[in-house]
Amino acid sequence: MPVINLYPILAAAVASFVFGALWYSPLLFRKRWCREVEINPIQASATSFRVYTLTFSITLFTAFAFAHVMGPNPAPGLSIPLALLISVAFVSASMGINYQFANRSLALWLIDCGFHVGRFLIMALVISYWPV
């Protein structure tokens, strides 16, 4: 099994986590997301340390798994299409099934799936352009 550099994986996880903070911030989609999930924006801002810790842990696991799928020193020409394939065909499509049964809105699906597409693209770029 090829050796995978852990530094770009950690950097990709941090970049993805920061992207999520921006994506769900008042600057972008917090107001609409809160309305769609029927949460008060003040309540959403008071998310616990446990939630953020678990979220980062899952993000780190995702970056690690994604790096292994891409292999060592992946070229952007491989990693970007792979990020789109995984985030759209697997993540977004699977979420679409769940959102239909949970009677969630199209707007919420677009916000949440847009985040996952963005975070996979960010992880692909960070890992691909990390100096060897």
Image (cartoon, helix red, strand yellow):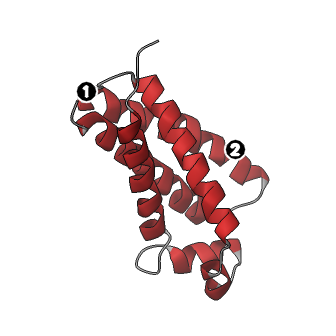
Residue 15 in view, yes or no: yes
Say which residue appears at 69% left-offset and 44% top-offset.
Answer: 97
Work out whether residue 21 or residue 92 is closer to the camera in this orientation and state it.
Answer: 21
Q: Residue under label 2, please give it.
A: 97
Q: Locate residue 68, reporting x and y percent.
A: 46, 25
Give the residue pinned by disc 1.
Answer: 75
User: Which x, y percent locates residue 122?
Assistant: 35, 48
Report the amino acid beneath label 2.
Answer: Ile
Q: Position of residue 128 (x, y in %)?
A: 28, 34
Is residue 56 depicted above or below 87 in this figure? below
- Left or right: residue 85 versus residue 94 is left
What is the crowding at mark 2: few (fewer than 14 residues within 10 Å), some, or many (at least 20)? few
Kindly identify the residue that appears in the image at 59 percent across and 64 percent down: 108
Q: SS at mark 1?
A: loop
Q: Earlier in the sequence, mark 2 or mark 1?
A: 1
Give the distance between the C-alpha atoms of the residues marked 2 and 1, in whole angstroms: 32 Å
Residue 61 is left or right of residue 40, and the answer is left
Quadrant in which the C terminus appears: top left
Q: Is residue 132 above or below residue 3?
A: below
Horizontal and vertical percent position of residue 22: 42, 69
Report the residue at 78% width, 56% height from top. Answer: 102
Q: What secondary structure is found at the residue carrying circle 2?
A: helix
Kindly give the residue lying farthest to the right in the view shown: 101
The residue type indicated by label 1 comes to: Ala
Mark 2 in CB contact with mark 1 (< 8 angstroms): no
Query: Residue at horizontal 39%, vertical 43%?
Result: 123
